[in-house]
Amino acid sequence: MLKSVILIGGPQKGTRFRPLSFEVPKPLFPVAGVPMLQHHVEECAKVPNMKEILLIGFYQPNEELTRFMCSAQQEFKISIRYLQEYAALGTGGGIYHFRDQILSGGPEAFFIMNADVCSEFPLPEMLNFQKEHGEPSSFVILGTTANRKQSMNYGCIVENQQTNEVLHYVEKPSTFVSDIINCGIYLFTPEIFQHIGAVFQKNQQDMLLDEQTNGNGWHRAEAIRLEQDIFTALAGQGKLYVYKTPAIWSQIKSAGSAIYASRLYLNQYHKTHPERLATNKEGGPRISGNVYIHPTANIDPTAVLGPNVSIGTGVTIGAGVRVRESIILHGATLQDHSCVLNCIVGWDSTIGKWARVEGTPSDPNPNDPYAKIDSETLFRDGKLTPSITILGCNVTIPAEVIILNSIVLPYKDLNRSFKNQIIL
């Protein structure tokens, strides 16, 4: 039997995702029309013998999370539970804290995956790879190839090219180590807890030796990072292997990367969910490229949508509207002849007639097959880095203005044009 664990983080995380994470926990933000986590859950549920999916994080249990879990359980016919950490325990500390829950029922192996990755999730391939490589209790990291410069922003893996064993692992090195990077998706056997336990014990002893623990040692001993504390130590011991995937993969750290992830998933829908892609129909809007439209959206037939557009529940789009490379969230209204490019339009926001809302895409270099998306800093040289435009929830843009490369916080009524600004 198998299980899956998805690490969903908590409210202190996902700060680069603001103002969108104010309204909904980042793992539930819709990417290609469905919550980010649903892509993970759907692929886990397809794996034969998968008995349970555990979500681990430190969000307070909330209505959105509960609603998502209930509907996903019914749709995918699999048990889904949320285990709440008392504090941020790191990628290894969280699973160690809940090891009894993960091991209950005696799974022979389990997947661990980060919620903020967009992937094809080659889980069956990882299982087959594990059977063919190393001993039965070996661990597998999903890896992909990045370019030399960008690889240093990720965990880098040096492998034995014959056996695919991980010989060396460095998290975010300062000089080039390897172009194989860690995708944040792992296949472990229960034996991993012996290795995490050893780090926990060592941390505890260090706490005792360190007199300045101020009674807070217990908490700190339990904060363990899989990447730096576990993989670095396991590399070169014949225990850790890397399965390299040529398939799509991207991190979803900033709001800009959500539009790119949406593009990757919409493209994949041709194979996995053709019914989710809109087509040109008599009396419907003009569709160019991959577009997802929620059935409850109300769209004028003279609108032109795509490529890479997803439109949420109850959205209203007027006559002559143009939308491209954007995510329009539920309840938003785009009035006649407005133009929305490279933009995320927040829940219940309104864009006036003939207004233009535009951002600058932060896409990877299209000429480099191994390029990944850069997690841009918000400011560069004291200026706002041009990036996609984000409207928080309930923002009103008046008619005939231009909003360019800006971030607008929730509940703002704008009265003029803005460019390159964060509007608080």
Image (cartoon, grey):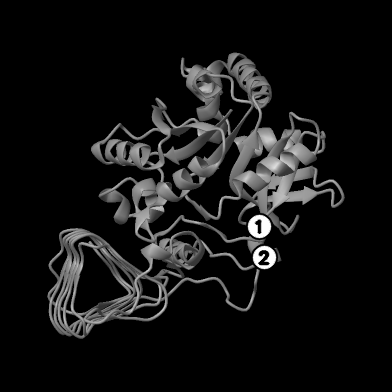
In the rendered view, tell whether residue 326 sits above or below residue 1. Answer: below
Residue type for callout 2: Lys
Q: Which element carries disc 1, helix, strand or loop?
A: loop
Question: 256 and 330: which one is in front?
Answer: 330
* Label 2–label 1 contact, CB within 8 A: yes
Mark linked to residue 185: none
Residue at x 84% of width, y 52% of height: 161
In the rendered view, tell whether residue 260 sits above or below residue 38. Answer: below
Q: Residues within 10 Å of mark 2 (few under 14, many from 20)?
A: few
**Residue that label 1 marks:** 152
**What is the residue that sits farthest to the front in this orientation?**
282
Question: 378 and 77: which one is in front?
Answer: 77
Could you say which quadrant of the image residue 354 lies in?
bottom left
Q: Position of residue 97 (x, y in %)?
A: 51, 22
**Residue that label 2 marks:** 149
Q: Position of residue 318 (x, y in %)?
A: 16, 78
Image quarter (top left, top right, bottom left or bottom right) of the N terminus: top right
Question: 419 and 144: which one is in front?
Answer: 144
Examine the rendering and report whether any part of residue 223 can be seen. Answer: no
Q: Position of residue 394 (x, y in %)?
A: 16, 60
Residue at x 31% of width, y 36% of height: 70
Q: Which element carries disc 2, helix, strand or loop?
A: helix
Image quarter (top left, top right, bottom left or bottom right) of the C terminus: bottom left
**285 with respect to 12 (left or right):** left
